[in-house]
Amino acid sequence: MRKRIITGACLAVLCIAAIVYGSIPYVSLMIALALLAFYEFARLNALTWREPTVLCGFFGVFALVFPWEILRTQPFSQLSFVWLVMFLFMVFTVMTKNKTHLDRIALPFIGVVYIGVGFHFMTVTRLMPDGMYWTLLLFGCIWMTDTGAYFAGRFFGRTLLWPSISPNKTVEGAIGGCVASVVVALLFVGFYPKFMWWQAVSLGITIAVVGQMGDFIQSAYKRIRHIKDTGALFPGHGGVLDRTDSWMIVFPFVHLFGWWF
């Protein structure tokens, strides 16, 4: 537990410093995490980084996460990038005479969309007007959801939430995560006049529910692969995918379905 707290605190400080500074440090951190996450995703699926489809996947993730607008250029829309990666994957099936078949390209393509789009919205959020505020708010709610769920489950957990997917998560822990997320969102109300208390409550609950679903998605996938963690980069937390699973779901969801911005 001590190792988990120390690692989490160090990662939080690094992320907060990058968010506050913004610009190149924040973008660089997001790109690095996204590429590491895709590497873990490929390894999880028994794909090596030297394979053409995986190299293409790295390109796709980078192209989706990098904020091209800061260079005052946008070679393609984000949707076009996704299509281009899909096209390149399918070209490999032809060039290898189906030795690289559709089943072999489907997983890395899913990884590009899952990871690339998720981190894309993390960079987009920081580049928005008042982007530092919204980025800190979303990350704060995500982190406190994890913290609240962990401690509420540890001290009050009795009812298992979804034991076939994640045997240690409880209903009490999930509720504790929601409460912690709402508290953080309410703390941000006073710093932004247009952000009302009822919006804070709504956003806090949404982040908590969607973020925990992102955690379940990754847990289900790891259970299929019969592994506990996707990596060991963060002691007590596992790999990058383990640490960012809720990030990659919350940020796109809030942008696509939220009304807070």
Image (cartoon, grey):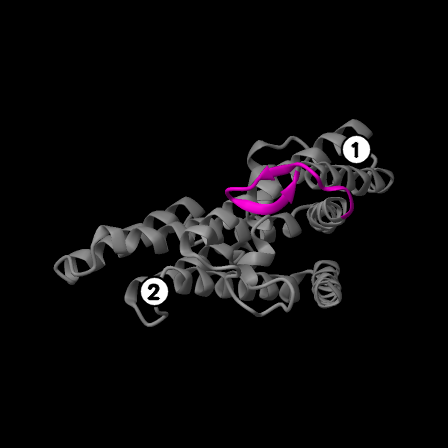
* Amino acid type indicated by mark 1: Lys
**Residue 102 placed where, x, y %?**
23, 51
* Local secondary structure at mark 2: loop
Magenta range: 155-170
Q: Image point 63% across, 48% down: which residue? A: 125
* In this view, the mark in front (2 or 1): 2
Q: Residue 203: which numbered mark, if any?
A: none
Figure check: 38 above or below 133: below
Q: In the image shown, does 86 or 22 lie closer to the viewer?
A: 86
Please give the residue where the numbered disc 2 appears in the rendered image.
47
Q: Residues within 10 Å of mark 1 (few under 14, many from 20)?
A: few
| Residue extending furthest toward the top | 198
Q: Is residue 123 left or right of residue 224?
A: right
Is the Cβ of the residue at disc 2 closer than 8 Å to that at disc 1?
no
Q: Quadrant of residue 196?
A: top right
Of mark 2 and mark 1, the one earlier in the sequence is: 2
Q: Image point 33% across, 72% down: which residue? A: 50
Q: Image point 80% across, 43% down: which residue? A: 184
Please give the residue where the numbered disc 1 appears in the rendered image.
194
Figure disc tally: 2
Queried whether the magenta region covers residue 169, the answer comes back as: yes
* Local secondary structure at mark 1: loop
Q: Image point 39% across, 62% down: which residue? A: 42
